[in-house]
Amino acid sequence: MTDLRPPPMVPIDCDLGDFQFMPLDVARLRDSGLASDESPEACWAAVLLWAASWHQVPASSIPNEDRWIAKAAGYVARGRIAKEWADVRPGALRNWVECSDGRLYHPVVAEKAREAWLSKLDQRWRSECARIKKHAQRHDMDLRAPSFAEWTEAGCPQGHRLPVPDDTAPCPRIVPRDKGSKGQGEGQGQGQGEVNPGGPSDLLSGSPPDADPRKPPGKVNGRPRTPASLDEAKESRLRSYRAQAVALLEFLNRRAGRAFQPVPANIDPIVSLLKAGSDPVQVRQVIVTRSRKWQGDAKMEEYLRPKTLFNRTNFANYVGELVDVPDDAGEGAVVAP
């Protein structure tokens, strides 16, 4: 027997569980038959069902089970369906359609869900293109990112292994069409389903995001400096600053008999000083001189803490009071990066 029911109105894997908000076309709802013909109770139950369907999979669908529907609409109490549900049900289910998968779909909610799903796939694709481009720049490879159409045809792969120059197998110029995992949590445009400003036609053009042409090329070890190498150099410097900051915090703990933990609140002020050009030995000098001056002073000893010592204004004043290098300031002066 031929199934006359229409196919599902959205892709079967359309999952908008990470979209907190569902778009609501205010004018469309205000002027709809639901608002003009149905009771307020039916209208409210309908809105609750739309909201429930938004986080179902596929989005915009609900199970064709009366008890589930009544509960989602707020008409089940103490395990029983309220008798009022019989009157509210027709209006609450206005315009819902049973599709070939046996679930009910709302055409308007499905329209919004498709837009949101497209924006989510767009963000995933662009993130994957950026990853591929950065990998190609880092390894000086000719590796082309897939177009949006190629990527979706391949199953929307993400995070799979990319070739490197030392691979024995030939290096493909385009990402292999494997069925990698699909990450969750992308596309959270607050759930409003915004599509990339270029529009759907831009998504299908297959043009991955280009690098910012305003960035100066420069060179690294005689080779052109790419945006990827700039990011790597910045991350390397930050790691070095943080390693030095941890060592300086440990030095403060030893000198002042404290146990400050290397958490951001204690580390970040030191990193800020180092990034501004302060020398680690100079930081040790301040720790030693302040410790000698304040330890044993009930009023001042509490200020032997990162928040006070490494405040940029306070630190500048403490440095200005240095007259010589204390004998023990050089302890552990060499800080491993």
Image (tube, grey):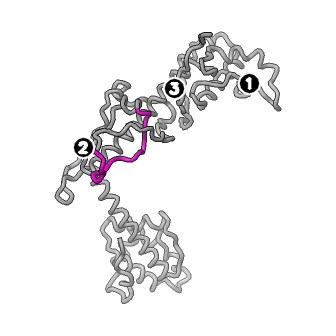
Q: Which residue is mark 3?
A: 11
Residue pointed to by mark 1: 70
Q: Where 298 sits versus 35, above or below? A: below
Whole-angstrom CA distance, mark 1 to mark 3, is 26 Å
Residue 37 x/y as whole percent: 66, 10
| x and y percentages locating residue 166 in the rendered image | 28, 54
Q: Which residue is mark 2?
A: 142
Q: Earlier in the sequence, mark 2 or mark 1?
A: 1
Judging depth in this view, the residue of 59 and 325 nearest the camera is 59
Upstream in sequence: badge 1 or badge 3: 3
Kind of element beneath mark 1? helix
Q: Answer with left or right where residue 142 lies relative to residue 274.
A: left
Instruction: Assign a secondary structure to mark 3.
Output: loop
* Foreground: disc 1 or disc 3: 3
Asked if the residue under mark 3 is in contact with the one under mark 1, i.e. CB atoms within 8 Å, the reply is no
Q: Is residue 18 left or right of residue 286?
A: right
Label 1 sits on what residue type?
Ala
Q: Quadrant of the N terminus?
A: top right
Residue at the image position 53 percent from the left and 17 percent from the top? 27
Q: Earlier in the sequence, mark 3 or mark 2?
A: 3
Q: Amino acid at mark 2?
A: Asp
Over which residues does the magenta segment extend?
154-170
